[in-house]
Image (cartoon, rainbow, N blue to C red):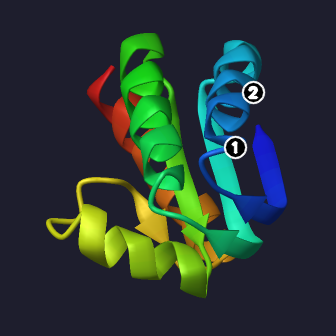
Amino acid sequence: MLIGVRGEVDATNRHALGRFVQRHTRVSGQLVLDLSEADFFGSQGFTSLYYASVHCARRDVDWMVVAGRSVLRILRICDPDGELPAVEDLEAALARLDHIAKSRHAVA
């Protein structure tokens, strides 16, 4: 599942983004949240990423965030240890998800 976000993510719409991710993770075992086109990503947007992370972990969904410049800035502040699975482009996200899927099949 690929979810692309454009425009702004801030306190006014962070819950809507979290709910959207929650509703759409039921159809796939993998998710790419593409925020590379987000013009603005406020610190409150980080809560939607944290929520997505918890939800994906509970549903056993592998996921990646494609982070643009504004998202990377917030992640450096709010996630200094790099706990969230963030990459800088879609190709890297797909490659990492493919690697995770292959690792799961090798173990099974």
Q: Nearer the viewer, residue 59 or 75?
A: 75
User: Percent x, y for residue 68?
Assistant: 62, 80
Residue that badge 1 annotates: 12
Residue that badge 2 annotates: 20
Mark 1 vs mark 2, foreground winner is 1
Query: Which badge, 1 or 2, is on the more N-terminal residue?
Result: 1
User: Percent x, y for residue 75?
Assistant: 36, 69
Q: Amino acid at mark 1?
A: Thr
Which secondary structure lies at badge 2?
helix
Residue found at the very far front of the displayed protein: 12
Residue 59 vs 53, above or below: the answer is above
Query: What residue sits 50% from the left and 26% below the top?
Result: 61
The quadrant of the picture occupied by the C terminus is top left
Which numbered tag is attached to residue 42? Answer: none
Which secondary structure lies at badge 1?
loop
Mark 1 crowdedness (10 Å alpha carbons): few <14, some 14-19, many ≥20: few
The quadrant of the picture occupied by the N terminus is top right
Mark 2 crowdedness (10 Å alpha carbons): few <14, some 14-19, many ≥20: few
The quarter of the picture where residue 102 lies is top left
Query: What residue sits 64% from the left and 78% below the top?
Result: 89
The total of numbered circles placed on residues is 2
The quarter of the picture where residue 25 lies is top right
User: Percent x, y for residue 34?
Assistant: 71, 60
User: Percent x, y for residue 30?
Assistant: 61, 35
Query: What residue sits 27% from the left and 73% below the top?
Result: 77
Q: Mark 1 to mark 2: distance in Å?
A: 14 Å
Q: Amino acid at mark 2?
A: Phe
Residue 2 vs 36, above or below: the answer is above
